[in-house]
Amino acid sequence: MENNINDPAVINDIIKINNDRIEGYNKAIELAHNHGLHELEADFRKYIEQSESFITELTPYVKLEGEEPTDSTMLSGKLFRTWMGIKVTIAGNDKKSLLESCEKGEDAFKATYKKILEDDDDTLSPSVKNVLTIQLNKQLEAHDHIKMLRDNASL
């Protein structure tokens, strides 16, 4: 790992979107449980564990710069989880609505990672960008799986 090359604030923004994803899937598990959609819980837990793993991979890069990794989320993520709960409650026991909400969360995650990777402002070392590219590719698989489940969900 290179020293004094990575902007810890940028890496902490990535950690925040992962914290949002964890909280979003925790909310999705709660909603799935409340609406008898137990078959979704294993996938949701898998993506929570994926983001926890991503955070573990990123933490040393923040600490190397003399900072601590954040445990907070983004305000937009908090608002999104509230909206997800309202939407699914209004829709009733609607698997498709829940999965649509999860897909929107995955879209936000993907957009954050892509924006950071496309910024060519030297705030991240090549090693961190490589880690982020690998994480993004794993997340894209998760996104496609959620989308497939959504497409196959009956109204």
Image (cartoon, grey):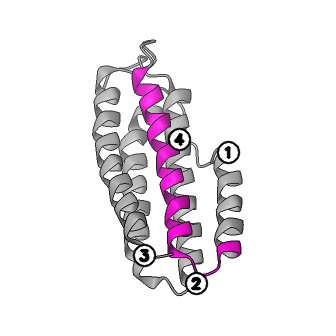
The residue under label 1 is which amino acid type?
Ser
**Is residue 117 found inside the magenta-colored segment of the image?**
yes
**Is residue 21 found inside the magenta-colored segment of the image?**
no
Picture quadrant where residue 89 is located: bottom right
Q: What SS does tag 1 mark?
A: helix
Per the rendering, the mark at residue 76 is 1
Establish if 112 lies above or below 119. below
Q: Residues within 10 Å of mark 4 (few under 14, many from 20)?
A: many
Marks 2/1: CA–CA distance:
25 Å
Q: What SS does tag 4 mark?
A: loop
Q: Nearer the viewer, mark 4 or mark 3?
A: 3
Q: What SS does tag 2 mark?
A: loop
Where does residue 151 sit, x and y in percent of width and height? 39, 64
**Labels 1 & 4 near each other (Cβ < 8 A):** no
Q: Can residue 63 be seen at all in this image of the molecule?
A: no
Q: Which residue is mark 3?
A: 40
Q: Earlier in the sequence, mark 2 or mark 1?
A: 2
Q: Residue furthest front?
A: 155
Q: Which residue is mark 4?
A: 69
Q: Earlier in the sequence, mark 1 or mark 4?
A: 4
Where does residue 35 sit, x and y in percent of width and height? 58, 84
The residue under label 4 is which amino acid type?
Pro
Where does residue 117 sit, x and y in percent of width and height? 40, 26
Q: Residues within 10 Å of mark 1 (few under 14, many from 20)?
A: few
